[in-house]
Amino acid sequence: MTDNNQGCKITLYWLEQSRSHRILWLLEELQLKYELKTFKRRDRLAPPELKQVHQLGKSPIITIEAPGTEKPLVLAESGAIIEYLCDHFSSGQPTLVPERYQAGREGQVGGEREEWMRYRYFMHYAEGSLMPYLVMSLVNDTVRNSPPFFLRPITAIVASQVESGFLTRNIQGNLAFLEHQLQTAPGGGPFLCGKELTAADILMSFPIIAASGRILKDETQRDKYPLLVAYAKRLEEADGYKKAVTKIEQVDGHFSASM
């Protein structure tokens, strides 16, 4: 039987309602063996125990104990973790990283295939462009609703101004962009980079599913972005995603995809 792990011991430090679920999905997709350590939030923040693994105390974090190494590799940041795992463990599932070059144009500037160009782009877009607006939206809702009741009329005005003057148009712009990207995906999609699921789709899953639960649940929004709604559902129905959800339910008793 093939050892997909190549003799490595992999540990994922998983935090509820966080980006770490994408790494769990990837581990399932790559058919890797791993140890799962789950953590609960405290006052919406990651627990201090995670700082014993990585100085920033954030999740996701993975450690890899590899043969011949003196100490475990400690990897943080979703994109970096996904790229590292795909670099070393994706031979059994090569479609997670699209082929880079067109035949006969290997190594040439502009010789890349559209599927790969999209893959590279969305590996950066997920955290660089989309997630900041969704996080700001969550913070804005907290500002609106958290103060004592006698202050809420004031915070509600501030939050509404931020929302109408900045957040709404940027979030809507990104949703429209993603709808168009799905409409123009190579080979007709149904994924962002073409016909096959890629690691970029896995990275995009957290903001897409979060947006589906917060923004796209409104019927008028669902009517505006039908391809995006279907894409979010497709991601949640992927075998690897469902296996990751089942693993958390077995270990933790409950899973929530919300931010």
Image (cartoon, grey):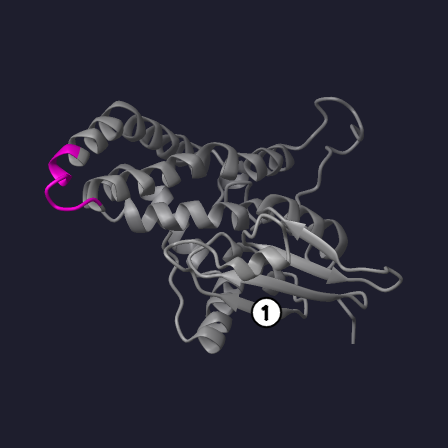
Residue sitting nearer the eye, 195 or 68: 68
The quadrant holding residue 163 is top left
Q: Residue at x 51, y 69 (%)?
A: 243
Q: Residue at x 41, y 46 (%)?
A: 208
Q: Amino acid at mark 1?
A: Leu
Q: In x, y percent, where is residue 57? A: 56, 52
Residue sitting nearer the eye, 189 or 150: 150
Residue 143 drawn above or below residue 18 = above
Is 218 placed left or right of 259 in the picture?
left
Q: In x, y percent, where is residue 105? A: 78, 28
Residues rendered magenta in the picture: 147-154
Q: In x, y percent, where is residue 74? A: 70, 54
The chief SS type of the magenta part is loop
Residue 31 drawn above or below residue 79 = below
The quadrant holding residue 24 is bottom right
Q: Local crowd at mark 1 within 10 Å, few (<14), some, or many (≥20)?
A: some
Report the quarter where the N terminus lies: bottom right
Is 167 placed left or right of 61 in the picture?
left
Q: How many marks?
A: 1
Q: Is residue 1 magenta?
A: no
Is 193 placed left or right of 41 in the picture?
right
Q: In x, y percent, where is residue 52? A: 62, 59
Residue sitting nearer the eye, 145 or 67: 145
Residue 254 drawn above or below residue 49 = below
Residue that badge 1 annotates: 36
The quadrant holding residue 70 is bottom right
Tell me the SS state at disc 1: strand
Q: Is residue 152 magenta?
A: yes
Q: Residue at x 66, y 69 (%)?
A: 34
